[in-house]
Image (cartoon, rainbow, N blue to C red):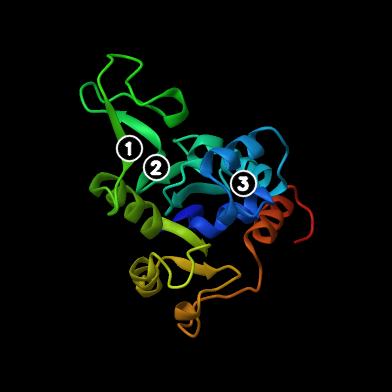
Amino acid sequence: MAEEGYVLLLGPGSLGELLGLDAALAEPLDLYNAARGRTRRGLELLRAALERGVVRRVVYLSVDGVLPRLLGGEHVLDVYGSASRMRCTRCGRKWWLEEGTVCPGCGAPGQRDYQDAPRSRLLGEAIYELTTAGTVAVHGLGEPPLALGAVLALAASRFTRVVLLEPVPQQLRGLGLEEPGKNLVELLEELAALQSGGPS
């Protein structure tokens, strides 16, 4: 049975729109620092939607690590991990690359905390979030989309409404999924207006 609230399935292309920056041309740490120091409308709308529970969770299919750092790990399922985060091979502690490559806890060498394939526990959690959501909004997956199989599986679900946000990858057009002609920030603005009782 579907639960209330949106789950956002976001890819690398979502970051630029949320931050109002050209994310494709910047390093993850630069994007994080630029977003941290300023108010970014898309990011603030997303943060508010998560705090109010209008958006339940973000399933993030990128390895830049920026959204999990800005929004917190409890809100973002970072399925592939983050190329800018380190993990201790001895004690399991995690820290960010700019803090060094040696574990600040035990002194053991660290390794990058990401994988080319989704992590099974996080993938299982992501599948649960996506298949139990009332609505899944898909954005920023690129051409070809990283999660074509996931979107097709969601499309087959009788319980989950799938909304494709602009720009819609060519491979997903014509599948009979909802295409409201909105981008991610426009959807978040609409959700904020609905929460406050204003017009959509």
Q: Residue at x 64, y 41 (%)?
A: 48
In space, the residues marked 3 and 1 are separated at their CA atoms by 28 Å
Q: Where residue 168 sits: x, y (%)?
A: 55, 73
The residue closer to the viewer here, 84 or 5, is 84
Residue corresponding to mark 1: 112
Tag 1, which secondary structure?
strand
Q: Where residue 139 sits: x, y (%)?
A: 53, 63
Would you say 164 lies left or right of 3 here?
right
Q: Residues within 10 Å of mark 2 (few under 14, many from 20)?
A: some
Q: Is residue 164 above or below residue 174?
A: above
Where residue 152 sits, quadrant-wise, is bottom left
Q: Where residue 95 sits: x, y (%)?
A: 40, 26
Q: Amino acid at mark 1?
A: Arg
Q: How many marks?
A: 3
Residue corresponding to mark 2: 83
Q: Amino acid at mark 2?
A: Ala
Nearer mark to the viewer, of 3 and 2: 2
